[in-house]
Image: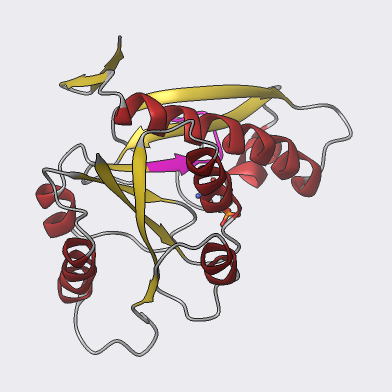
Amino acid sequence: MLNLGILISGRGSNMESILKSIKAKKIPINPAVVISNNSNAKGLAIAKKLGVNVEVIESKNFKGNRTEYDEKIIEVLKKYGVTPKNGLVCLAGFMRIISPTLVKKYKNKIINIHPALLPAFPGLNSQKQALDYGTKFSGCTVHFVDAGMDTGPIIMQSVVEIKENDTEISLSKKILKEEHRIYPEAIELFARKKIKVSGRKAHIS
Ligand code: GRF
């Protein structure tokens, strides 16, 4: 069975929905480790409560560059069997740009959830970006991570309607509900080997 490593920085609600789906035996993958770059991340307590190993590699005051930090991540992933050959890495609210070293080593083995319909509104505050732009729909995207910012092959998307009275808070809430639904689904597709990547396209069988 594949080993899953989840990288978080904060609340950890996507992590929780993934771990709960695994526990409900919906996804054939071993939840090997949750890694946080922030020792205050709320998600750490949730992971522990669900019986999953947690590790913190504090990024604040880290003495070294991005590559050196990511080498620490790779070390911990390997310790738990999350290897490029036998693992999957999920970014779930991990608030760091990852280095080309990590991306290359885990090519098409790192996935991310983004709270907008990519390629629209990459980067931070995507819900606000969508509201400010005036789009009538937004949503979320699960995608492979490549060297760019939110640019990798798209695995799954879900659309939500933006209503006249939506605020950043209400829109974020609607989108998050969909994130919690599609992220576990995308991981299940990966675990069942139903995703093939060619060029920038992820084909689902
Ligand atoms: C989510 O909105 C996700 O799309 C974005 O960061 C947020 C993380 O929330 N990448 P949580 O930590 O999973 O609750």
Is residue 150 among the parts visible in the rendering? no
Residue 29: percent from the left, percent from the top? Answer: 34, 40
Query: Who's the residue at 53% across and 29% down the image?
Result: 182
Question: Is residue 151 shown above or below 52?
Answer: above
Question: Is residue 124 shown above or below 165?
Answer: below
Question: Is residue 176 shown above or below 63?
Answer: above
Question: What color scheme is it?
Answer: secondary structure
Residue nearer the viewer, 135 or 3: 3
Q: Is residue 32 magenta?
A: no
Query: Who's the residue at 46% across and 77% down the image?
Result: 38
Residue 13: percent from the left, percent from the top? Answer: 61, 53
Residue 41: percent from the left, percent from the top? Answer: 55, 73
Q: Is residue 113 magenta?
A: yes
Classify residue 8 as left or right of residue 146. right
Q: Which residues are magenta?
A: 112-118
Classify residue 177 as left or right of residue 99. right
Classify residue 78 as left or right of residue 154. left
Task: Name the image quarter holding the N terminus.
Answer: top left
